[in-house]
Amino acid sequence: MSTIDKFLEELITFLGVGALHVLGIFLILDGIFNIYFLIDIYVQTSIWVVYVTIPALFIIAYFLGVLSMLLSELIVSRVFKKGDFSKNLFATITKFDNQMLSTRYESMERIRKLLNSCMLALPILAMGSVSEAHNLGESSAAGYIGAVGAIFIAICCPLLAIKIEKDLMALYIIVKQHKKKKNK
């Protein structure tokens, strides 16, 4: 994967996670203050959208995505005590000098960081869904169902990240045993 591809993938990851935060915050504020109609008046002009809204949301979403990733890494390393495992696995794979394992490790790290970042973004989205539910009238159940779904996915995210690490460790053991047999 080229440097530009890695940069774009990381940028899109941060923007995606940040967009979940922005949406959740907007839904919370709209549920409390009913601000949608006020914002709708301002964004009807094309100049407002192009020059103010899009760049501002882009920067805010990126910042929230980066902040979410950093906070989630801190929380996960404290709660699951996974920091040493990841560092040791990285050091071992680097010493092993196997391109397939290195590529798989990089992919696993990107997915793990995304899953852990979503662990923080999805509860905010769930709070926004609950906050917005009363504005949905007869469809308010959809807000509550959305909140339950977001919480469920938020709980699954770190569990999936741990599963990915275990799968990588199993792959490492298989490749290591194969290399030992080949060297005999």
Image (spheres, rainbow, N blue to C red):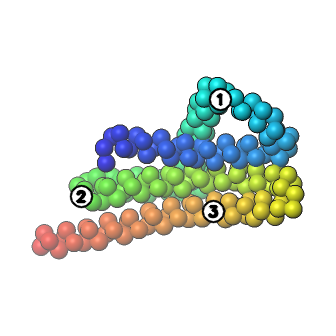
Judge from the rendering whether residue 61 lies leftward or rightward of residue 108; answer left or right: right
Disc 2 is placed on an element classified as: loop
Is 50 situated above or below 129? above
The kind of residue tagged 2 is: Asn
The residue beneath circle 1 is 46
**Foreground of the two, 32 or 138:** 138
For marks 2 and 3, the one nearer the N-term is 2
Quadrant housing residue 23: top right
Judge from the rendering whether residue 141 lies leftward or rightward of residue 5; answer left or right: right
* Residue 99 place in picture, x, y as percent: 25, 56
* Residue 142 place in picture, x, y as percent: 77, 62
Q: Depth-wise, is mark 2 or mark 3 nearer the camera?
A: 3
The residue beneath circle 2 is 98
Q: CA distance from mark 1 to mark 3?
A: 36 Å
The residue beneath circle 3 is 153
Quadrant housing residue 5: top left
Do the residues under discs 1 and 2 have CB atoms within 8 angstroms? no
- At 44% across and 52% down in the image, what residue appears? 110
For marks 1 and 2, the one nearer the N-term is 1
Judge from the rendering whether residue 18 lies leftward or rightward of residue 146; answer left or right: left
